[in-house]
Image: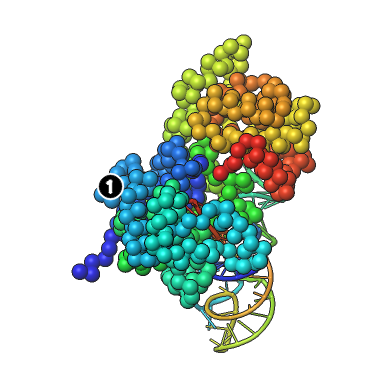
Amino acid sequence: MTNKKTVRTRVAPSPTGAPHIGTAYIALFNYAFAKKHDGEFILRIEDTDQTRSTSESETEIFDALKWVGINADESPAAGGPKGPYRQSERTDIYRKHCNMLVENDKAYPCFCSSERLTELRKEQLAAKEMVGYDGLCSTLSKEDAQKRIDNGESYVIRMRVPESGDCVFNDRLRGEISIPWTQVDQQVLMKSDGFPTYHLANVVDDHLMEISHVIRGEEWINSTPKHVLLYQHFGWDRPEFVHLPLLRNPDQSKLSKRKNPTSILYYQRAGYLPQAVLNYLGLMGYSMPDGSEIFSLDQFIESFDIDRISLGGPIFDLQKLANFNGQYLRELTPDSLLGELKTWNLNDDMWKEVIPLAQPRLKTLADLMPMATFLFTDKLEYATEELLNNQIDAERATRLLKISQWELEKIVNWHGDTIQETIGNISEKEDIKTKKLLAMFFVAITGKKVSLPLFNSMMLLGRDLVLRRIHYALENLATDGTVLSGKKLKKLQKEYNSLYGNRS
RNA sequence: GUCCCCUUCGUCUAUCGGCUAGGACACCGGGUUCUCAUCCCGGAAAGAGGGGUUCGACUCCCCUAGGGGAUGCCA
């Protein structure tokens, strides 16, 4: 039987925070490759980080992928023969596999405290040594280890790593990659809370789910040896590895929300068409064999050739995306454009929310639209002075906006009352009259000093657009000379962490 | 620090040893349009540097430089 295995690919996002544009990017290439080869595409939720994963975020990932038009053949929502597709529901599987490794002495329990580990890291950094676990617990006898476990000591499972030689593996796009084993840490496989780390869960799942091609971001190249080792220890065939270049900010760093809107939901709310977004993503690190730049998902799949991927990290260019979006909009008939507008936001559902807010403030029917426009735009025009309103100096405004951004990001249930609570909390902690704080927010969020009720408006706008508006406000302040430099930002973040609790 | 990856216009890219280096976005100029947008025409704009290999190198190899990534009980 030398039947070629069916192609099975997957995207495996972790549900922490807003659905990332990079997830759609990776998903697109996985999807196209699978479909091109009559294979299957799987969506797996990697929610092994219990402190950061939320079901809200998971739902957003489903919605976001659905919005761009990438449908998984198997997923937590759709089910499938290799489920469950949510890692938090597979802990028994990981535990079983981890035990196998411990029994075969490929892994061992480690009792080192996180304090010792940070101290160790600090020392290594200072001594300019290679940073990593020093193997203190690796020499513990099985009996001693068991005794400590029985005593109820907290522990993790680490994997043993060869002490010399190189790990050699193949990357479809780059060819042979060789990484010295000395560079590979004795990775934690099982955390003290009983959940696996990415590395263990990922390898186990990819094998059990019969993933044939692991197509993922370049950031994973360095940990591939850990995965290779696990495949080896389990005696499994390894999949083909394809590492895609990383999407970048204009300054070439890895795409981050600090510098770019990265939430798919933002693009949705800001009025981009999913086809245009997907089309644009298909041009990142890739080009069609015939050179065409405007194409549908079907056309993309039809001619897809994974070996055409180019490796320089592409900069995500909002201008070009906007142009593409414009091209798509112009192609629509007026009727279908109207349809797009309705499915977007310009519909009765929205007006039913807006009208009660506007009604008490109306003198004529004609007053409605000016009041409501801010709900249907992306960037607002206003003078920076209005933001400050002679009440707050630019320095303080910057601080308040940044803190609000961080606080608003943390809200799990995006509702008027939770928003109010958050803002109220900020005004208290920052010792600023709510009235003053709100004045600034009114301008940042609605573009005017006087507008519809703020918290309701923020709710209707959605978190992503609100965060973007704050970003624009900060940008305005920055162009006026109040820049939150790296150093200042770091300091602020530190203060913030102690005052408001850590940001993840 | 260490390791890994990458390197063509400002940006996304084409080129798989023959190049007057092509296209797209952005930019500039001109035309169409009551304005604007669209549309059309035109322009400026690139092979990081240095060594090889070769009749010939943007394409292959090496070195240097630059950029990025990894170095977590995050993924």
Q: Is residue A140 left or right of residue B55?
A: left
Q: For this rendering, which residue is in front, A448 or A463? A: A463
Seen as rendered, the residue at the extreme left is A1
Residue at left offset 54%, top offset 23%: A417
Residue at left offset 61%, top offset 20%: A452
Q: Residue A473 appears at what percent x and percent y?
A: 68, 36
Residue at left offset 50%, top offset 20%: A353
The crowding category of the residue bearing disc 1, from other C-alpha atoms within 10 Å (few below 14, some 14 to 19, many at least 20), is some
Q: Amino acid at mark 1?
A: Gly
Q: For this rendering, which residue is in front, A8 or A447? A: A8
Residue A135 visible to an observer of this rendering? yes
Q: Residue A166 appears at what percent x and percent y?
A: 47, 74
The scheme the figure's colours follow is: rainbow
Above or below: residue A451 compared with residue A426: above
Q: Quarter of the image holding residue A172? A: bottom left
Q: Residue A480 appears at what percent x and percent y?
A: 77, 39
Above or below: residue A311 compared with residue A194: below
Q: Is residue A251 left or right of residue A306?
A: right
Residue A60 visible to an observer of this rendering? no
| Residue at the spot of label 1 | A80
Residue at left offset 42%, top offset 59%: A145
Q: Residue A504 appears at what percent x and percent y?
A: 56, 44
